[in-house]
């Protein structure tokens, strides 16, 4: 009796290809762009695809930063001129918002513009 | 009605389970995990530190890839954030906690009811037989060895002996009940403490 | 080759229990084999599930898979933890994949192909579960080595299973009956 049949080779090759393809994920690991929030010596980093609200306290009070639907903006600030709030939503790598009075700096970092879902949804 | 010690332990474990699963504080979850491990070890289940530490480290490191919160330091170009570390530790602790709680739950050897239970006891009986016969076999040719092993069960029927039909007495049941009520209460107290302001105060410096 | 389409055929309890015991025995052996990485698995316990493909009727096969899951869970004490979820998911995935593949394509596919397909199904399910339960997106870091090891061990196990099916006297007697 034969040990291997044609289907064994087909399945083996298909699976080997799939396994090799999974190594592509290593090139993608930096994944989603990240929102960096700097205040004084501290820095906070968040994944842009996860919605959240972060409150940072600075010299004049608090700065509230919202990350929603892969975009970021300053929703509230205790400073007087509110330039940061007026700056509106940012969603691309390299874009930033700054609040000078409260010493808060928000920057989107990453390799590329966000694609919906990132690597999570593209495989499987 | 015939209540078994094993059943009490099983139900108690099910009551404790969500207290670990829903825990929000790492600190109190760690206490719960230690508690679960002690319970398992007390009832003669094995505990080895190294695999658990490896699990904790692996899960934590992998979770670092999703940055979340205060930037602590970098590994190469990868920023390590406090929130990501915490998420990783939480997931690993939950896993370890449930693992040992589960060990505790089966420590009194619960029996499945009915036909499935009988089938399982039959399976375990065969395992003992296989292990016994396998030990005395020439394993240099594994295919023949397995073949001989399986063939050796052809001619005979395994006798099902009902050796464990002991009924737990009243005092044993009462003691088991008392102990498990205390365990459940403590697990849920740890959960409540973890959700309270106390845990926030303790953890606040991490955020 | 095999005839077990008779729906009124009673379930062969002894046979199923024996094969289930064999899975359990093999997982104990696997447990004793030292492994370089904690998450690495060989999947020895899948051997009886592969051998059983040509022997058991659908109901019996499902029962075997259930006993494998319950038996392992009870012996290792993991039955009420996440680990049971992984084990249930992977056993179901590989058992279904292997059974359907065998039923549909046994003329073209041998144990190697069936074993690889089962292992891939099982590993993908485990990775998907670990993505949500344990690792988050960092799962992609674990996936390539995990799938590679799974693939290699599946090939080896498949070769062994095929040799067994070709040569075993016990197997022939079961298929004939």
Image (cartoon, coloured by chain):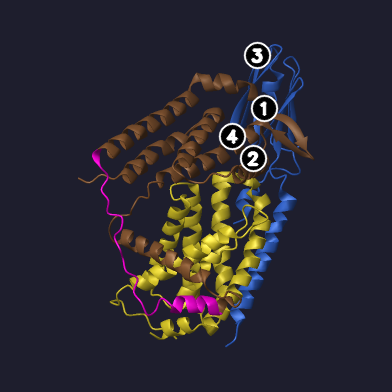
Chain colours: A blue, B brown, C yellow
**Disc number for residue A43:** none
Taking the magenta stretch, the answer to whether it contains residue B163 is: yes
- Mark 4 → mark 2, Cα distance in angstroms: 22 Å
- Residue C43 is left or right of residue B105, and the answer is right
Q: Which residue is mark 3?
A: A78
Question: Dot 4 falls on which chain?
Answer: A
Q: Which residue is mark 1?
A: A88
Question: Can residue A117 be seen from the camera position used here?
Answer: no
Please state the horizontal and vertical placement of residue B35, each as a whole percent of the image: 48, 34
The answer to whether dots 3 and 1 both sit on one chain is yes
Please state the horizontal and vertical placement of residue C57, each as a whole percent of the image: 38, 75
Magenta stretch in the rendered image? B144-170
Quadrant hosting residue B141: bottom right
Please state the horizontal and vertical placement of residue B49, each as a whole percent of the image: 60, 42
**Disc number for residue A51:** 4
Taking the magenta stretch, the answer to whether it contains residue B100 is: no
Please state the horizontal and vertical placement of residue B143, each as a whole percent of the image: 56, 78
Question: Counting other residues with Cα less than 10 Å from the Cα at mark 4, is it few (<14), some (14-19), or many (20 or more)?
Answer: some
- Mark 2 → mark 1, Cα distance in angstroms: 35 Å
Secondary structure found at label 4? loop
Please tell me whether residue B163 is drawn above or below residue A2 in the rendered image.
above
Foreground of the two, A57 or B39:
B39
């Amino acid at each position: 009796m034969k040990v291997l049949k044609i289907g064994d080779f087909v399945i083996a090759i298909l699976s080997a290809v799939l396994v090799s393809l999974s190594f592509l994920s290593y090139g993608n690991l930096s994944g989603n762009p990240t929102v960096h929030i700097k205040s004084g010596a501290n820095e906070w980093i968040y994944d842009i695809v996860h919605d959240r609200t972060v409150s940072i306290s600075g010299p004049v009070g608090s700065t509230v930063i919202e990350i929603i639907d892969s975009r970021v903006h300053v929703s509230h600030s205790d400073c007087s001129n509110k330039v940061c709030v007026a700056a509106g939503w940012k969603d691309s790598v390299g874009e930033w918002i700054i609040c000078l009075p409260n010493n808060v700096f928000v920057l989107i970092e990453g390799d590329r513009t966000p694609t919906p879902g990132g690597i999570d949804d593209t495989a499987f | 009605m015939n209540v078994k010690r094993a059943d009490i332990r099983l139900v108690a474990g099910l009551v404790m389970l969500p207290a670990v699963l829903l825990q929000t504080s790492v600190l109190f979850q760690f206490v719960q995990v230690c508690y679960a491990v002690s319970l398992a070890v007390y009832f003669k289940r094995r505990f080895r530190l190294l695999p658990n530490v490896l699990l904790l480290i692996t899960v934590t490191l992998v979770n670092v890839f999703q940055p979340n919160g205060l930037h602590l330091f970098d590994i190469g170009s990868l920023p390590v954030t406090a929130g990501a570390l915490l998420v990783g530790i939480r997931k690993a602790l939950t896993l370890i906690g449930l693992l040992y709680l589960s060990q505790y739950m089966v420590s009194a050897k619960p029996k499945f009811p009915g036909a499935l239970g009988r089938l399982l006891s039959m399976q375990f009986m065969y395992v003992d037989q296989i292990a016994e016969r396998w030990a005395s076999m020439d394993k240099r040719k594994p295919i023949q060895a397995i073949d001989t092993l399986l063939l050796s069960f052809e001619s005979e029927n395994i006798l099902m002996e009902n050796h464990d039909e002991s009924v737990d007495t009243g005092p044993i049941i009462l003691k088991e009940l008392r102990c498990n009520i205390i365990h459940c209460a403590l697990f849920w107290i740890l959960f409540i403490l973890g959700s309270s302001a106390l845990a926030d105060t303790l953890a606040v410096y991490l955020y | 080759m095999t005839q077990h389409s008779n729906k009124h055929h009673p379930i062969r309890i002894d046979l199923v229990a024996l094969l289930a015991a064999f899975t359990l025995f093999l997982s104990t052996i696997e447990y004793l084999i030292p492994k370089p990485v904690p998450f690495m698995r060989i999947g020895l316990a899948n051997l009886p599930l592969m051998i059983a493909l040509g022997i058991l009727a659908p109901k019996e096969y499902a029962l075997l898979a259930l006993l494998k899951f319950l038996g392992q869970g009870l012996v290792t004490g993991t039955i009420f933890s996440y680990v049971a979820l992984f084990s249930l998911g992977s056993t179901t995935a590989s058992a279904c994949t292997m059974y359907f593949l065998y039923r549909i394509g046994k003329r073209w596919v041998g144990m190697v192909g069936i074993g690889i397909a089962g292992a891939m199904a099982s590993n993908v399910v485990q990775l998907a579960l670990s993505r949500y339960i344990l690792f988050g997106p960092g799962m992609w870091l674990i996936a390539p080595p995990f799938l590679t090891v799974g693939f290699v061990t599946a090939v080896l196990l498949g070769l062994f299973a095929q040799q067994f099916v070709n040569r075993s006297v016990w197997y022939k007697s079961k298929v004939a009956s």
